[in-house]
Amino acid sequence: MSLLLTATESAIRTITLNRPEKRNALNDELIAALKAALREADSDESVRAIVIRGAGKDFCSGADLSSIQKIATASFEENVEDARVLAELFEQIREVKVPVIAAVHGRSLAGGCGLATACDLVVATDTSRFGYPEVKIGFVPAMVTAILRRNLGEKKSFELLTQGFEYSANEGLALGLVNRVFAEDSFDSDVREYAAVYSKVSRSAVELTKSLIYRIDGQTFADALETGAQINAKARMTEDCKQGIAKFLEK
């Protein structure tokens, strides 16, 4: 059985984690397959957005049992290398040119919650659950902290990461960690409609906006404005912008 299922409809590439019997738990093979699928989608100029979702009852339950067992017996250097595998996936999601959308149903916990948080956008069913329970077994969700801290600030990040409780999709929406909450019975169609927006707007403008958002992270205000000026000028030179201006002037 394939670890991933991929499908493309109306310029939207859907990548489905396909280990439902393991609640789509992450292991080295699944992470490698997801990286490869993202690279392939990123190289396809017809793709306007990527949706990551899970097969079965849950989005992703976190690390696979075999991965956790490996952690317990590995050396410090081996654990650093192992941790970097997931860190590289999180970084890759930001480097993919088009929006990457996590479509979460069921439970999204530990590394699975990290995967969702690492995506550019998160949509969820009204019954889905999120959380970072790693602290309960003496573990630290360290890589996603780099993202969570940027999304939430210190106080809320500290609470979520050190208390390990689950939170609902609506609580995630209030925190700003979830973009939209949809009814479970209409989730598939709602996700398609949400992602389809990117097939109707300028691909180059979306690409440049995504690049800008992440490039200015950590820059001073003045440097961020200068980066914005550079991106603005680059956008003006694209065919999409030239055609858009021409259509606007024709009105």
Image (cartoon, rainbow, N blue to C red):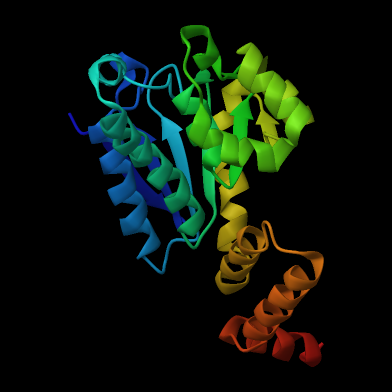
Residue at the far front: name it.
Answer: 76
Q: Is residue 64 left or right of residue 58?
A: left
Above or below, 188 against 231 in this view is above
Asked if one can make out residue 203 in the rendered structure from this viewpoint, the answer is: yes
Q: Is residue 175 left or right of residue 46?
A: right
Query: In the image, residue 116 lies at what x, y percent?
Result: 53, 34
Query: In the image, residue 111 lies at what x, y percent?
Result: 45, 26
Asked if one can make out residue 190 in the rendered structure from this viewpoint, the answer is: no
- Which residue appears at 57% of the width and 30% of the height? 187
Above or below, 203 against 105 in this view is below
- Classify residue 33 by image quadrant: top left
Above or below, 149 against 172 in this view is below
Residue at the far left: name it.
Answer: 1
Q: Which quadrant is home to the C terminus?
A: bottom right
Q: Is residue 74 left or right of residue 44?
A: left
Above or below, 198 against 122 in this view is below
Query: In the image, residue 92 lies at what x, y percent?
Result: 42, 52
Query: In the image, residue 123 lies at what x, y percent?
Result: 61, 35
Q: Is residue 111 left or right of residue 199?
A: left
4 or 82: which is nearer to us? 82
Q: Which quadrant is home to the N terminus?
A: top left
- Which residue appears at 36% of the width and 57% of the height? 41
164 or 1: which is nearer to us? 164
- Classify residue 162 by image quadrant: top right
